[in-house]
Amino acid sequence: MGKNRLEAFSDGVLAIIITIMVLELKIPEGQGIASLLLILPTFLSYILSFIYVGIYWNNHHHLLHTLQKVTGPVLWANHHLLFWLSLVPFASGWMGANPSATVPTALYGIVLLMASIAYNVLQKLIINTEGVSSTLKQAIGNDTKGKISMLAYMIASGLAIIQPWIAQALYVILALLWLIPDRRIERMLYSTEKDGKSRK
């Protein structure tokens, strides 16, 4: 399988995930501002989840650009990532409908944690396939940012049991951390392409 087909399939799944999330936004029953305020927690949860899915789409796009060969393990690792991302609409909707509840907020963090772990597994399998001198390995190094994020999701999920709003604040902070474009792979690809052209 070529990587273009893998990328197209992944893009389609992520597009469906975003569509499902927006369909969870119910039209207010009333006509005033008060009616809109009733769905505000759900809307804010949607915005946060939209940002997270967008972040994953951006990084996944760069990730697949480093891939030269699609193997069976890489395919399944990609499916594993998409599985956890497909649970974002459910977790997002539940947390939005119950913003002060502990279990929905904790579950949201667990889904983000598992998606982060799945992304890390996909990265490692690509590196194993491409080799330690691969573009991806050179770009991400030890992936400190990714490891810190996984730890933070774990902590936030635990804090949700104590105080949901603290966990939700951490989810927002982590989204903002990744919202700043991670250009490590992009810079490495540009450098490799530039070197290749200079040799010609």
Image (cartoon, rainbow, N blue to C red):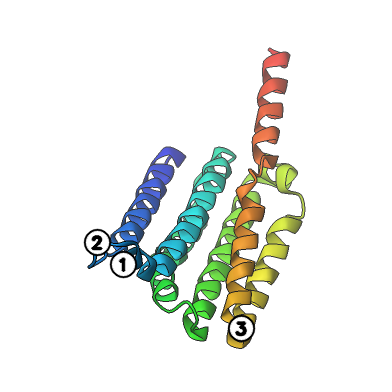
Where residue 166 appears, as percent x and y from the top left, is 63, 75
Which quadrant would the C terminus be assigned to in this image? top right
Which of the 4 quarters of the picture holds residue 23?
bottom left
The furthest residue to the top = 200
Residue at left 60%, top 78%? 157
| Left or right position of 176 against 4 | right
Q: Nearer the viewer, residue 133 or 138?
A: 138
Circle nearer the N terminus (1, 3): 1
Q: Label 3 sits on what residue type?
A: Gln
Q: Is the residue 124 above or below the residue 150 in the image?
A: above
Report which residue position mark 1 lands on.
35
Structural distance between the alpha carbons of marks 1 and 3: 27 Å
Q: Given this view, does label 2 or label 3 mark the residue nearer the observer?
A: 2
Which quadrant would the N terminus be assigned to in this image? top left
Report which residue position mark 3 lands on.
163
Q: Is the residue 191 above or below the residue 149 in the image?
A: above
Residue 87: tell me if it is visible: no
Residue at left 36%, top 68%? 39
Which of the 4 quarters of the picture holds residue 40?
bottom left
Q: Nearer the viewer, residue 193 or 56?
A: 56
Where residue 108 appears, as percent x and y from the top left, is 50, 73
> How crowded is the residue under tag 3: few (<14 C-alpha within 10 Å), some, or many (20+)?
some
Q: Given this view, does label 1 or label 3 mark the residue nearer the observer?
A: 1
Question: Which of the labelled discs sits on residue 78, or is there none?
Answer: none
Question: Which of the labelled discs sits on residue 31, or is there none?
Answer: 2
- Asked if the residues shown at circle 1 and circle 2 are in contact, with their CB atoms under 8 angstroms apart, the answer is yes
Q: Label 2 sits on what residue type?
A: Gln
> How crowded is the residue under tag 2: few (<14 C-alpha within 10 Å), some, or many (20+)?
few
Structural distance between the alpha carbons of marks 2 and 3: 33 Å
Residue at left 69%, top 33%? 187
> How crowded is the residue under tag 1: few (<14 C-alpha within 10 Å), some, or many (20+)?
few
